[in-house]
Amino acid sequence: MDCPLTAEKDLSEWKKFRLDSDKNDWIEDIDISGAKSLYEKEAQDRPLRVLVLYGSLRQRSFSRCCAYEAARLLDYLGADVRVFDPTELPVKGQVEETHHKVQELRELALWSEAQFWCSPEMHGNVTGCFKNQIDWIPLSLGSVRPTQGRTLAICQVNGGSQSFNAVNTLRVLGRWMRMFTIPNQSSIPKAWQEFDEYNRMKPSPLRDRLVDVVEELVKFSLMLRDHSSFLVDRYSERKEKGDFGRLLSQEEKEKLRKNDVLKSLTNNNKS
């Protein structure tokens, strides 16, 4: 599936994570031959489409630093990676859905086959910046569910000691968005100590875990992407489409329910 925005937008805007070719990259020195061989076998002619989201607007955002490292790993494996920049995304409900950043985010969600989410933990939860992005992605657009059946990897960065509050929330959000969230996850404590002056992650078990998560995302995505439609095919949705020709919004369902109640009351009064 091509992203409709591709023709209008320079792809480099989504690929700012890429480094100058003359810079030494630690990713080239790690052994991810298992995932790479699987990728070459399953996706050489059909690159895996991955959307990356992060949750901070700060000039030096560690969730963006981490998201970029994940994107570089995915890019190295051969995936088509696009990182969404939330800088100009308005607060949910502040503007109409036709806003260009809302449309960009939704089209990228539809385009993707897998996603990588990274949020800072703030007051024991994900940031408003990150949650706002998820809030703008609806569960359904007509008969299409933008995130249903996608694979998902989750990660959080912390300013202090290690915590798992944000990744726990991200896992709940992934389930709510009907995604396959992989078992592994990453939580990076004292993130300000884990990145060098070039915003690259320093060698550590925490960096190794991030590699694990990305590698696992690729493996699960390649195994599931051709079967996701079958795995999320639901009787209730088939029935709804058969009755109404499409999936209904929650508002439409409520109106139908109220009409059914009114009809029942009218029939009872007549009898």
Image (cartoon, grey):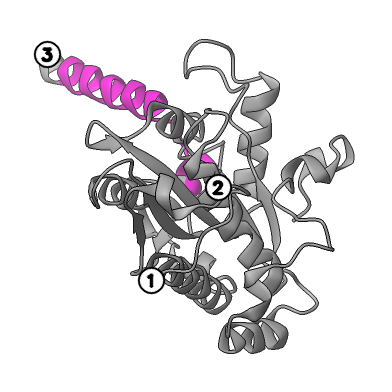
The residue singled out by tag 1 in the image is 205
Question: Alpha-carbon neighbours of circle 2 within 10 Å: few (<14), some, or many (≥20)?
Answer: many
* 93 relative position to 258: left or right: right
Identify the secondary structure beneath mark 3.
helix
Magenta region includes residue 247: yes
The dot on residue 82 is: none
Image coordinates of residue 221 in percent, x first then y, are 54, 71
Magenta region includes residue 26: no
What residue is drawn where x is 44% and y is 54%?
Answer: 194
What residue is drawn where x is 34% and y is 26%?
Answer: 256
Main secondary-structure element of the magenta-colored stretch: helix
Answer yes or no: do the residues labelled 2 and 3 have beta carbons within 8 Å? no
Residue 178 visible in the snapshot: no
What residue is drawn where x is 79% and y is 38%?
Answer: 5
Q: Name the image quarter holding the N terminus.
A: bottom right
Image coordinates of residue 114 in percent, x first then y, are 56, 60
Answer yes or no: do the residues labelled 2 and 1 have beta carbons within 8 Å? no
Residue type highlighted by circle 1 = Pro
Where are the magenta residues, as a range? 241-267
The residue singled out by tag 2 in the image is 65
The residue singled out by tag 3 in the image is 269
